[in-house]
Amino acid sequence: MLPGDATMRNILSVVFLLCALDAQAASKAEIDAETKEAVQNFYKHTAAGHELAKKAAGMLVFPNVIKAGIGIGGEYGEGALVLKGKTAGYYSIAAASIGFQLGAQARSQIVLFMNDKVLGGFRNSQGWKAGVDGSVALATLGAGGSIDSETAKKPIIGFIFSNKGLMYNLTFEGSKITRIKR
């Protein structure tokens, strides 16, 4: 076996995993139901996030992002852009990573576009890449569940959480978000 064979197997494993996830694409009704549940779960975990969401021009919700890897990893999820409580479009999020990693996890991700300018830039893009097309300030909670005041002033704010609450030391950087047809 050549040294590159294991790396190639890992790459192929991740590619097949992500293809399998894409093949099981959710319907509009499934995405809408999961999005509604994820938003309710988000509001339960952070009152400050709920207040920010009320002020946002738009909310991009990925209810179930799956990340898996063995040395080389990938993540994929589908979700909806919500404007004034209504679904305005469906999107996928995908990313790849290299480094020490083993296992899989599921989480929810919410991106708040705090003004019409950044929301318009997102909606008019052919494929929006976090960190390139817009920097996403990852929200963390401080004392009493408040969000850092500097983060709250950012034009794009992201939240990553599970059913156990907000998750830390994660990032949106490098994630590609693309509109999908449903």
Image (cartoon, grey):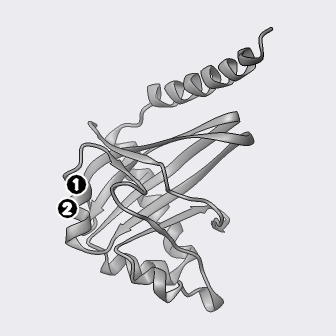
| Residue 99 vs residue 42, the one in the foreground | 99
Q: Are marks 1 and 2 in contact (CB under 8 Å)?
A: yes
What is the tally of numbered marks visible in this picture?
2
At 55% from the left and 87% from the top, the residue drawn is 146
Residue furthest to the front in view is 3
At 61% from the left and 28% from the top, the residue drawn is 14
Q: Quadrant of the N terminus?
A: top right
Q: Quadrant of the C terminus?
A: top left
Left or right: residue 163 compared with residue 150: right
Which residue position is annotated with label 2? 120
Left or right: residue 48 compared with residue 129: right
Which residue position is annotated with label 1? 123
Q: Amino acid at mark 2?
A: Gly
Residue furthest to the bottom in view is 144
Please, what secondary structure does the residue beneath circle 1 have?
helix
Q: Amino acid at mark 1?
A: Arg
